[in-house]
Image (spheres, rainbow, N blue to C red):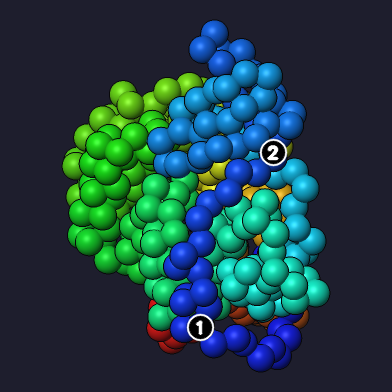
Amino acid sequence: MRITMIAIKRTSFCLLLALILSVMAHAQRASITYINTRGAEKVAKSALISEWTYRDIKFKGKTKRTIPTDSLISVSYKNQPEIFSTARDMIAEGNYRSAMPLLDDIIAGKTMDGKKLRKKEQWCQEPSLYHAWRLSRFLGRMKEADGYKAALLKMAPKTHFLPKVILREAQDLYDFGQFDKAIAAFAALDAKASKLGFGNEYRVLAGIGTAKALLGAGKMSEAANAQAAVSTKAKGETQRLQCEVLRGNILLAQKKVGAAESLFQELFKKANYETQSLLFAGAANGLGDCAFAAGKFKDAMYEYSKTFALFDGQEGMDEVVGWAFWRFARCCKQLAAEIDTDEAKVLKYRFRKNREVAAIQYRFSRGGQLARQDKGLGH
């Protein structure tokens, strides 16, 4: 992801919050892809959504349907207000500072030309609050982010974005190296997912997060037990293979480099980079980590480069891409220390460049935080 630095005059945040508190969610048209009760993939091309919560989505296509979160594949909005589609395009391009004032206008109920959003367009305020929360955090505006979050939950207490918010906050604790707090936060996510019906995906992600935090805290046997436990919760090939990536990480932490490498190679062969991005990147990073542990820094660089070459800037890939940039940088530093030629200067430059990308562009990732520590920066 890349940020275009544009100076802007921001609307009073307090005013924005006051304007949205009375806003109610409105139905919207969307193309909805889901798995039906027979296990077949279906598409409702012009469905009218009446409610979308962390538990399920209700809509009317040819018939009225209620699809649980676990069976929902994707939702593509129809007839988006111009201001919302423009903001989303800017976000996709990494122009976060440019997108923020548009999101603020949407939250305040305005269109691109300053008119009021029509009643049927007001549905876009909920996702705009979520994106404003996410972007303001990335930009380091944590107090504003808290305000957007509070407003989102005030507007839609059962918003389908709630699991993402809770997961991100638990992930932050892990990224910041606060492993004991992260363990507790992931456990709380698992409990909420079970009680409120977030969907099995979040129980699996909570279990993976718990195991990674235990690993970070140096609790190897507990991490292995947590990995075994979350594997039993996995449903479907994607979740199962994500748990296998975690098993590879634990094997590597146990210094069983050969076993970890064999596992990651098998996973990499199975991964489709277009449809299984996290699996592909997790396996590539795993192979990079194995090569790094063996002192094969050029081989490690090649593996890490697969991740950031394909997924730099892709939403939802920050953790794996941030790790790839940081470890690639460390490889450059290691190799530069081993030679005394002009190539060392190039490697030192690549170290600084990739460390900077990890520290700034992927600040909210474990690799990004390690890069920031290396630069002497705070969270």
Q: Quadrant of residue 313?
A: bottom right
Compared with residue 342, is residue 274 higher up or lower down, i.e. above or below? above
Quarter holding residue 106: bottom right
In this rendered view, identify the residue nearer to me: 273 or 168: 168
Question: Can you say whether 335 is above or below 316 in the image?
Answer: below
Q: Residue at x 60, y 86 (%)?
A: 11
Mark 1 vs 2, N-terminal side? 1
Which residue occupies the foreground of this view, 125 or 1?
125
Residue 83 locus on image (x, y percent): 75, 65
Q: Check the picture and name the quadrant holding the N terminus.
A: bottom right
SS under mark 1: helix
Task: Identify residue type, mark 1.
Answer: Leu
10 Å neighbourhood of mark 2: few (<14), some, or many (≥20)? many
Kindly report which numbered mark, 1 or 2, lies closer to the viewer in this rendering: 1
Q: Is residue 89 left or right of residue 223?
A: right
Q: Residue at x 57, y 22 (%)?
A: 64
Depth check: give the residue in front, 167 or 311.
167
- Which residue bears the numbered disc 1? 15
Residue 107 seen in this snapshot: yes
Q: In the picture provided, is 231 more to the left or to the right than 59?
A: left
Cβ atoms under marks 1 and 2 closer than 8 Å: no
Mark 2 secondary-structure assignment? strand
Q: Is residue 204 visible?
A: no
Residue at the limit of the structure toward the top, as seen here:
38
Quarter of the rendering occupied by the C terminus: bottom left
Q: What residue is shown with label 2?
A: 30
The spot of residue 69 in percent (x, y) is 47, 32
Q: Residues within 10 Å of mark 1 (few under 14, many from 20)?
A: few
